[in-house]
Image (cartoon, helix red, strand yellow):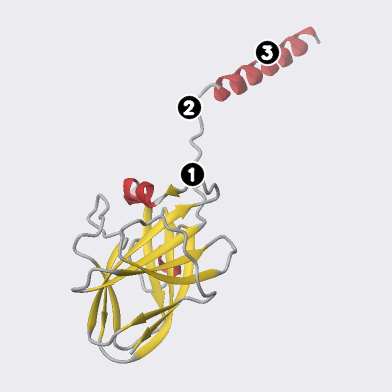
Amino acid sequence: MLKNIYTNSLLIISIILFVISCSKGEPVVVHEHEVFTRVVLEVKKDGEINYTKYTFEVEGHDDHGHDDHGDDDHGDDDHGDEHAEVELNTDSTYHVGIFFYNDSDPDNIEDITLEVIEEADAHQVFYEMTEIPGFSIAAAPDDTKDSNGNPLFLKTTWTTTSETSGDVKAYLIHEPTSKTGSARADFGGATDAEIEFEVHIE
């Protein structure tokens, strides 16, 4: 009887020591998920100086319209119409940048684009659209690339030919399982931010 009690006591003590030793092991690394409240598209026609800025609210807010600007202050908080329609000309090339912000605190607006660039391997921007004849999006030559040489699509070149229109969704994907695909599902990972707009070419 005493032998059984002694054996059980040793077993309990062993379990307790094992649990304590495990709790003192390597700390669990938790990804601090950034808050994305605003996405900005800056669209500049090739050969022109001024760009058009389209601002979108994310996280359940409606997207907004655009403003014309000649400066490079990416942090302006300008909103317009509830549905963004990106107006483009036929037979043209456009240089487009996409920027991500957290403006939860108006006195301390965070440009999260910088973090996306620093963590290039863990991010990917993807433009998903229905077939839009006469319109294409490609990575710009000066786009940020990850350690494998994959472009992030933070800077893109939009090319137009004929009159057309169609809907486009832009995603910022966190830790994608693939960096190529023709649909959002092909990339896996989690969606950090998502916006939608209509491209109108005439």
Q: Amino acid at mark 3?
A: Leu
Dot 3 or dot 2, earlier in sequence: 3
Q: Quarter holding the C terminus?
A: bottom left
Q: Amino acid at mark 1?
A: Asn
| 158 over 131 or under it: above or below | above
Residue 177 seen by the camera: no
Query: What number is the disc on residue 26?
Result: 2
Query: What number is the disc on residue 10?
Result: 3
Q: Position of residue 129 (x, y in %)?
A: 41, 78
Query: What number is the disc on residue 108?
Result: 1
Question: Residue 23 or 200: which is nearer the viewer?
Answer: 200
Closer to the eye: label 3 or 2? 2
Residue drawn at the location 53% of the way across and 62% of the way down: 58
Question: Residue 197 or 107: which is nearer the viewer?
Answer: 107
Q: Position of residue 181 (x, y in %)?
A: 35, 70
Residue 201 seen by the camera: yes
| 21 over 116 or under it: above or below | above
Dot 1 or dot 3, earlier in sequence: 3
